[in-house]
Amino acid sequence: MSFLELFESYQWSAVCESFHRKTQRDVENALVRTGERTLDDFCALLSPAALPYLEEMAKRSQAITQRRFGKTLQLYAPLYLSNECQNICTYCGFSFQTPFLG
């Protein structure tokens, strides 16, 4: 199943209603669940009921990130072999739509 098919399979009005009906108990259940989480868990963690758990979620996120990547800083620096790129990033001087000033 493609992402689009999966996305379109949801009744988003029902998802929004579910989002606002989440309780602190739902948030706690989502936080203790191991393995794959569900869309309901995701809604619970983003719901207004999750606000008191924000600091705990931030600490968990930091711990998971450090466990996965270590305490490193990673930068992405593309190295182009020419002065022209096929992408159209408006902020980039290598974009093929950027006029040459030389």
Image (spheres, helix red, strand yellow):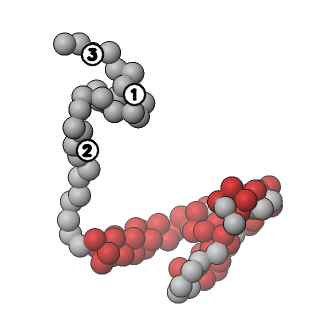
Callout 1 secondary element? loop
Label 3 close to label 2 by CB (< 8 Å) = no
Give the number of the mark in front: 1 or 3.
3
Q: How many marks?
A: 3
In this view, 58 is above or below 89: below
Q: What amino acid is at disc 2?
A: Pro
In this view, 9 is above or below 66: above
Q: What amino acid is at disc 3?
A: Phe
Residue 91 in view: no
Q: Position of residue 46 (x, y in %)?
A: 58, 63
Rounded to the nearest angstrom, the CA distance separating label 3 from label 2 is 19 Å
Q: What amino acid is at disc 1?
A: Thr
Badge 2 local density, few (<14 within 10 Å), some, or many (20+)?
Answer: few
Left or right of 51: which side holds 38?
right
Return the disc, 1 or 3, that comes first in the chain's sequence: 1
Q: Position of residue 9 (x, y in %)?
A: 78, 62
> Which residue is drawn at the image coordinates 28% and 71% (left, top)?
69
Q: Which mark is residue 6?
A: none
Left or right of 30: which side holds 79?
left
Residue annotated with mark 1: 90
Q: Quadrant of residue 19?
A: bottom right
Q: Position of residue 58 (x, y in %)?
A: 40, 68
> Which residue is drawn at the image coordinates 45% and 71% (left, top)?
57
Quarter of the N terminus within the rendering: bottom right
Rounded to the nearest angstrom, the CA distance separating label 2 from label 1 is 16 Å
Q: Quadrant of residue 48?
A: bottom right
Rounded to the nearest angstrom, the CA distance separating label 1 from label 3 is 14 Å
Residue annotated with mark 3: 100
Residue 47 in view: yes
Callout 3 secondary element? loop
Residue annotated with mark 2: 78
Return the disc, 2 or 1, that comes first in the chain's sequence: 2
